[in-house]
Structures are given as C-alpha cells and as structure tokens.
Image (spheres, helix red, strand yellow):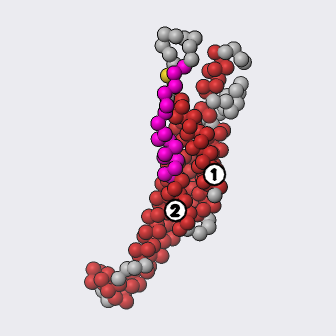
Amino acid sequence: LVGLVCAAIIAVRFDAAAQELAGFRPRRHERCGDEDRRPGRRRLQAWTVVVAVVWLAVTLLYPNPVPFLGMSMWLSSLAALALLPTQREPLLFRVKSFVFVYALALLGFKLYLWQIHRAEFEAWAGVLGTTPTLAHRIVLNNTSIVTTIGMWGTWFLLPFAHVSYLVQLFMVNRDSLLFPLTAPERIVEMIRGRES
C-alpha cells in the first residue's frame, strides 16, 4: 500500500508538473500577456499507472521481502524526485522503469519456477539420452542453481542497482547553494522577477 501511495503522489504531483511544463508555450509577440498552456498528454501518468498495476500484481504473487523491496524502491524514487529538482524530468521515466523491470524479472522468475516444477523427466531422459532417474537428478541440480541465482537477483541485485543509481545521482548533482531544493523553472522566475 505504501508503494501505491508513492505511485499516486508521483502521478499527481510530479507527472502532472512535467506534463504541464511540456505543454507550456510562451507567447511570441505579446510579452506582457499570459503564457499559453496547451493541455498536456497524460502519458507520464499513464506509465505510472501501468507500473503500479504490474507492481501490485507481482506483490500479490510473492512473500516478503519482495513487497518490502518494492516499497523501498517506490519510496526512494519519491525521495529522489523531491530532492533532485534539476533531474526531475529524466528521473520520472528512469525510476519507474527500474520498478517495471524489477516486476518483469519477478514475473519471469515465477514463470520459470512454475515451468520447472512441471518438468516431465521421462521426456528429458529421451533428450539427454539417460534414464529417467538420472534425468530427474540433473534437472533438480540445475533447478537449484538457477533458483539460487534467481533469488539473489530478485532479492538483492535489481533493487541494489536502483538504489546505487539514485545514490550516484545524489553524489554527482549537488543542490544549488543559493536556492537549495528549488526547481529550475522557479529559480528562473525568481531571477526574472528580481525576488532574490
């Protein structure tokens, strides 16, 4: 539920602001007139809804720690969007893509587990040219190796990639010393209006 709340905040606050910025058009000849705002397309919000729905489906399929890891990814995404205003537009797509790829990897892993437990050892014995007992042992040995790798990937590697990407952004992109946590468009407005 916390992940879905974070997704809703991202859709309502950050996606809407980015879509409004994309639809912004200053007037050419009437410099003192109001700016013209086109209604923006809702593609960013639609992408957030798709990612949240896929993530909800995956959360219902897996026990802990997968829902906790996904919640952490949503929370860290929301924190990055709030604390890195200069990187907000590129981050909107990237953080949701991390969550989406993580959800797809979890679905693929679940499909693999479902398929491997339905393996027909007699058919594999014909393919491998061995007895069904030996084929059964070979399939089980390979299953345990791939399952271990899959669990490491879904529990640690993919969430770690998301967090390490955000940490790298925090290290590289320092806040403005004069206007910390202020969006670039607001800084331009303040400079143009001589509010500083």
Q: Which residue is mark 1?
A: 5
Vertical relation: 42 (above or below) 30: below
Instruction: Tell me which corner region of the image, top left, top right, bottom left or bottom right, holds residue 132.
Output: bottom left
Quarter of the image that includes the N terminus: bottom right
Residue at x-position 43% and y-position 79%: 117
Within the magenta stretch, is there residue 167?
no
Q: CA distance from mark 1 to mark 2?
A: 15 Å
| Left or right of 46, for residue 185 | right
- Disc 2 target residue: 57
Q: Which residue is drawn at the image coordinates 51% and 70% (left, top)?
A: 148
Quadrant in which residue 115 is drawn: bottom left
Q: In the rendered structure, does residue 49 fall within the stretch colored magenta?
A: yes
Q: Give the extent of the magenta segment.
A: 35-51
Question: 36 or 190: which is nearer to us?
Answer: 36
Q: Give SS at disc 2.
A: helix
In which quadrant is the C terminus drawn?
top right
For residue 121, above or below residue 114: below
Mark with earlier residue (1, 2): 1
Secondary structure beneath dot 1 equals: helix
In this rendered view, identify the residue nearer to me: 57 or 135: 57
